[in-house]
Image (spheres, grey):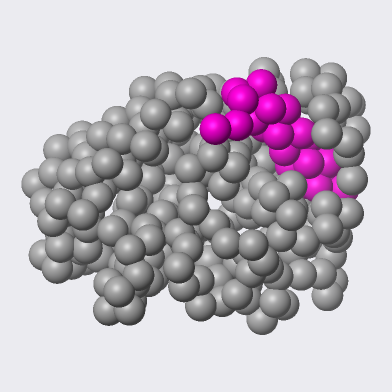
């Protein structure tokens, strides 16, 4: 197990990457990216069983699918810092002909990306398909997916959620980023989601909640608990309570930074709160 302080160094550097990427092109989604930084750092560096290198088939290793593709800055940073592609390539985020587009796609051939995402509500279906393929292939590895809470307002999710339980897709762990914010405001004001734990349970899932969704130790413990519940006839859902914009004080407690880049002055402020740890690209 990696030491928590080593993982925290990756978290802080990833925040810097997110902020600098979005600032450079004055475009992107820093809020949700910052809110999911601890989760993705823990998942890729501590929890998932991964092979060396990358191939699209993903046989004999755990898989991850990002459904809320607009938080691509954190996904790209975590992949680069894990060694999937050069860290320096983060400097091409959202540029013409870059492999790092605003929403991940596959035709650029970026290692670590197995599905185009960003059209919200589709990732659950993709993850279920991959999990079923692993069962058919006799591959005992797991499939992980991440979804925004506002994304659950899309109906396709609930068809997929019902299908996964009905077909006992018990090698799937889907995490809901429960930050309570979406582009138009708080989720409970835009379209209330109610009690997500009860909803998933009624649909036949095994559900656990992680109240400290920006705490590395709590996340790792939650993911390991979720792993222990796989293979028992039910898909597993983690409801992860996070803070949008976590790590940057003026980006927290608001939906305003869902899809807005910081100014020069705001960037300097944000970076001062997250000192360089592993080296900027």
Q: Is residue 207 above or below residue 232?
A: above
- x and y percent of residue 96 in the render? 84, 71
Quadrant position of residue 193: top left
Q: Which residue is drawn at 35% across and 51% down?
A: 174
Principal secondary structure, stretch drawn in magenta:
helix
Q: Which residue is drawn at 36% across and 32% down?
A: 222
Q: Residue at x 35, y 28 (%)?
A: 210
- x and y percent of residue 140 in the render? 33, 63
Which is nearer the eye, 239 or 61? 61
Q: In this view, does 156 lie above or below 150?
A: below
Q: Is residue 151 above or below residue 51?
A: above
Left or right of 237 in this view: 121: right
- Does any portion of residue 196 appear in the rendered image? no
- How many marks do you count on the picture? 0
- x and y percent of residue 18 in the render? 74, 42
- Residue stretch in magenta: 1-26
Q: In which quarter of the image is the N terminus?
A: top right
Which is nearer the eye, 130 or 72? 130
- Does any portion of residue 148 appear in the rendered image? yes
Left or right of 159 in this view: 125: right
Quadrant position of residue 272: top right
Quadrant position of residue 163: bottom left
- x and y percent of residue 84 in the render? 71, 60
Q: Quadrant of the C terminus?
A: top right
Q: Residue at x 48, y 23 (%)?
A: 217
On whether residue 19 falls in the magenta region, the answer is: yes
């Amino acid at each position: 197990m990696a030491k928590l302080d080593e993982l925290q160094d990756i978290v802080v550097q990833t925040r810097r990457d997110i902020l600098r990427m979005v600032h450079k092109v004055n475009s992107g989604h820093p809020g949700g990216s910052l809110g999911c930084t601890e989760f993705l750092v823990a998942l890729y560096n501590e929890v998932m069983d991964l092979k060396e290198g990358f191939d699209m088939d993903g046989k004999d290793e755990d898989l991850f699918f990002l459904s809320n593709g607009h938080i691509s800055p954190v996904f790209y940073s975590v992949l680069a810092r894990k060694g999937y592609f050069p860290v320096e390539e983060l400097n091409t985020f959202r540029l013409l002909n870059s492999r790092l587009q605003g929403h991940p796609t596959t035709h650029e051939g970026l290692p670590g990306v197995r599905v185009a995402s960003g059209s919200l509500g589709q990732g659950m279906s993709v993850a279920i398909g991959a999990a079923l393929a692993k069962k058919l292939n006799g591959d005992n590895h797991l499939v992980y997916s991440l979804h925004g809470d506002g994304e659950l307002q899309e109906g396709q999710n609930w068809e997929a959620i019902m299908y996964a339980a009905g077909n006992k897709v018990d090698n799937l762990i889907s995490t809901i980023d429960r930050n309570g914010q979406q582009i138009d405001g708080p989720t409970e004001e835009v379209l209330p989601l109610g009690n997500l734990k009860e909803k998933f349970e009624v649909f036949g899932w095994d559900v656990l909640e992680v109240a400290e969704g920006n705490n590395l130790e709590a996340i790792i413990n939650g993911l390991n608990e979720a792993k222990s519940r796989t293979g028992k006839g039910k898909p597993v859902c983690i409801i992860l309570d996070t803070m949008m914009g976590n790590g940057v004080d003026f980006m927290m407690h608001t939906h305003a930074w869902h899809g807005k880049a910081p100014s020069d002055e705001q960037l300097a402020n944000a970076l001062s709160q997250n000192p360089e740890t592993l080296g900027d690209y």
